Image (spheres, rainbow, N blue to C red):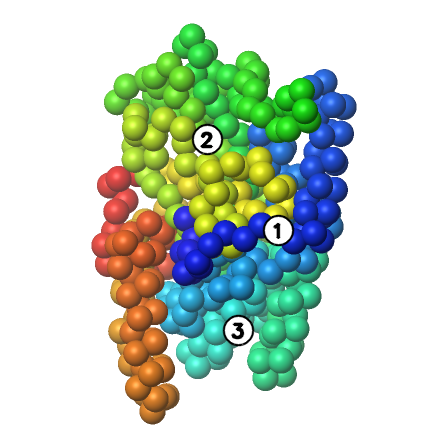
Amino acid sequence: MPRLAPQLSLRQPDADALAHSEHLRARIQEQIIAAGGSLPFWKFMEMALYAPGLGYYSAGAMKFGPAGDFVTAPELSPLFAACVADAVTPVLQQLGPDAEFVEIGGGSGAFAEIALAKLLANDALPARYAILEPSADLRERQRERLHQRLPPLLFELVAWLDGPPDEPWNGVLFANEVIDALPTPRFVIRDGEVFEEHVALDGEGRFVRSDRPADPMLAAAVRHVERQLPEPFAEGYRSEVLAQLPYWLQAVMGGLKDGAMLLIDYGYARSEYYQPQRSDGTLRAFRQHHLVGDVHAYPGLQDITASVDFTALAEAGTGTGFDFVGYCSQASFLIGNRLQENLALAESRTADDIARHALRTQVKQLTLPNEMGERFQAIGFQRGVELGAAFLVGDLSHRL
């Protein structure tokens, strides 16, 4: 899950926020009624997060940082983006001056700001730094931040995409904490059969869980996972399976020919993801840096997320025709991509002991097992280039 910043108490939404949420709630209720009484959970999640002008990621509320609902690695420390830039520098240099960098979901723009500066220092600037951002609000925030903080030479390289690049391109595709927010189907085993979790309405119009027989695609995806586990799913076992992941990855890479794909998120290898004791899956919600138990509450005001099955991601990546490169913890990835050197460089640029202490605290937060270090994982793919050096430390490929 994203790192939660310290917060004393979970505040109730104010009147404007409640009105916003009720508007989206009514929209979802209408869809449930029009669909005959229930919607698949993934559709509820899609509307709650991405409904135009109303969804959590589509509306104007602050998402990232201490004032938002969670803190991602790029907002936590500039060292994260610096290390990623060092990891992909050889790829961009191998591809030459026409190489591009495509970031999926640009967050606050913090990653792009630091990555571009580091790539310039590494003599590995891409011909274009493209951000595929579905949220119009976030896109404007990114544009404002980068315009203010980047020199014109670098800002001119940044472009915002309305969709994946259709034309053939070579370069790097990067995503941090994106896959966990993809609308995910939920399944449950009943009498040995696969059912799909839906969202229905109770007598007072509140959202409630309801199960329906799964369609053939979801049932096949669940059985594919089950065949790779030591034992079949137990009666009542409930979890997520992102059956559409291969199609999503193929879509967002667009016309990528030669290059690398680097994806960082929180999750597990398949055998860890579907452990018997994790019998209600990994789905959860966040609001104001608190873990919220009710994922149906306050639609549009809280993030909804599920951990990533990295075995499924490995299958999807190789299914695009790319070669699997490596899989490791975020801590190992950062350490293997010049974390100590980047820390030393950052410390040398400040004479302030407080700032140096803050940098060292950031390193701990990025790498310690009880922080982000082990809960977040990195996975890479390549075609026509070499990314392997980025995964020389702590490779966990044997777990996939």
Q: Residue at x 44, y 12 (%)?
A: 190
Q: Secondary structure at mark 2?
A: strand
Q: Which mark is residue 242?
A: none
Nearest to the eye among marks 3 and 2: give it: 2
Q: Residue at x 71, y 53 (%)?
A: 16
Residue 162: horizontal and vertical position, in percent? 70, 55
**Residue receiving disc 3:** 113
- The image's mark for residue 240 is 2
Question: Extreme bottom residue here?
Answer: 351
Q: Amino acid at mark 2?
A: Glu
Q: Between marks 2 and 1, how big is the CA–CA gap? A: 29 Å
Q: Nearer the viewer, residue 371 or 11?
A: 11
- Looking at the image, which residue is at 46% across and 20% down? 188
Give yes or no for contact between labels 3 and 2 (Cβ–Cβ under 8 Å). Answer: no
For marks 3 and 1, give the one nearer the viewer. Answer: 1
In 3D space, how far apart are the residues under numbered discs 3 and 2 (Cα atoms)? 34 Å
Amino acid at dot 1: Pro
Q: Secondary structure at mark 1?
A: loop
Label 3 SS: helix
Q: Which mark is residue 13?
A: 1
- Sooner in the amino-acid sequence: mark 3 or mark 2: 3
Answer above or below: position of 31 versus 323. Answer: above
Q: Which is more N-terminal, label 1 or label 2?
A: 1
Return the disc, 3 or 1, that comes first in the chain's sequence.
1
Residue 388 visible, this orientation: no
For label 2, count other residues whose C-alpha is less than 10 Å away and answer few (under 14), some (14-19) or many (20+).
many
